[in-house]
Amino acid sequence: MNLLLHLEFFLAVAEEQHFGRAAARLGMTQPPLSQGIKKLERELDVTLFHRTAKGAVLTADGQSLLPDAVDLVSRAHRFTDSARRRGAEQRTIRLAVMPKVPTALVADLVATLREATVSGRVETVIAPSSDIVDQLESGALDVGVVEHPALVEPLTGSDVVSLPLSLLVPAAHPAAHHDPCELSRVGGLRMASPPRSDGPAAHDLQIDAFARLGIDLEIVPAPDDRWALASVAAGQAFALTADPELSAPGVQRVRPDSDALRLRLRCLRSPSGGVADAVIDAAARCIARFADAAGSGLGGAVR
């Protein structure tokens, strides 16, 4: 017999003095509650209640045993609460960010999550947006920062925040002498970019922005900004970056003349319920502060 469960039954009926009201309080129907009380009485070999037409009245034995029942249930609750607090204190938040997130922003996110969690422990991985969504759904991750738009249901998270993008072009290319630079000026270059599979919807939107200008882009595979920077430095391609510090010899940073080119980020959480709203809110504010410092302001509520 589950003694604590049946003691909860005992306390509810004792306090309500009525089986129907006690059952409603416990979120159950009356028959299993009555059966539970009878089972407890058989186990203890005592009669706990006098059943009357108006309800239930404690017997002398019931009155005598009530304080001990209250104490046992209270201690059980304290034990459970203590164990859960200990688990929360020892928990490590598993964070994943997609490769286009600037290095400084990743560091800010880690520091922010450490402050927002009890344990102060954060594990970080870099992964494509599509992989992050899958791992959040499976519970392998707690928090993820992905590129918008992406298919994220049933995940929930923050509004979208957008970061401005800069063009990185070979210093010897004519586009390097134009700031802001018309996108048509990079038409003769390939674009260093992560593969479409990392985030199909976001990738297609970016390609479409150039297609509307009549530019049919050829992609140079670049898993992250470091690979993209190397391709630009070699004179093979141009790249788009949200990292204001990314630079290398032979690479020129210029602003695109189109505000349509932005890195749109969204902070998501696992549906397991292990991450509080306050943690997601803190991460979203961190991204917004970075966007504001980069001169973009908030891109919040972008749909």
Image (cartoon, rainbow, N blue to C red):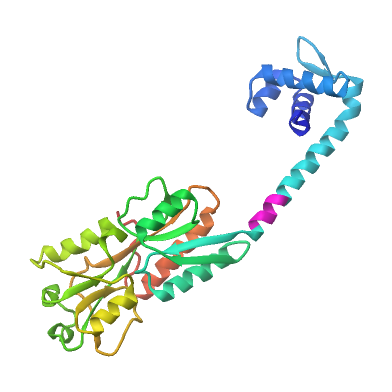
Region in magenta = 83-88
Q: Residue at x 24, y 81 (%)?
A: 232
Give residue 142's position: percent from left, percent from top. 50, 56
- Foreground residue among 129 and 9: 129
Q: Residue at x 23, y 84 (%)?
A: 234
**Direction left: furthest residue:** 214
Q: Is residue 232 visible?
A: yes
Q: Quadrant of the N terminus?
A: top right
Q: Is residue 72 magenta?
A: no
- Answer with the quarter of the image where residue 98 lies: bottom left
Give residue 116's position: percent from left, percent from top. 56, 63
- Say left or right for 192 vs 109: left
Note whether 158 is above or below 245 in the view shown. Answer: above
Q: Residue at x 16, y 61 (%)?
A: 208
| Magenta stretch, main secondary structure class | helix
Give residue 276's position: percent from left, percent from top. 54, 53
Q: Quadrant of the C terminus?
A: bottom left
- Answer with the quarter of the image where residue 44 lies: top right
Q: Is residue 253 visible?
A: no
Give residue 134's position: percent from left, percent from top. 40, 52
- Foreground residue among 169 and 109: 169
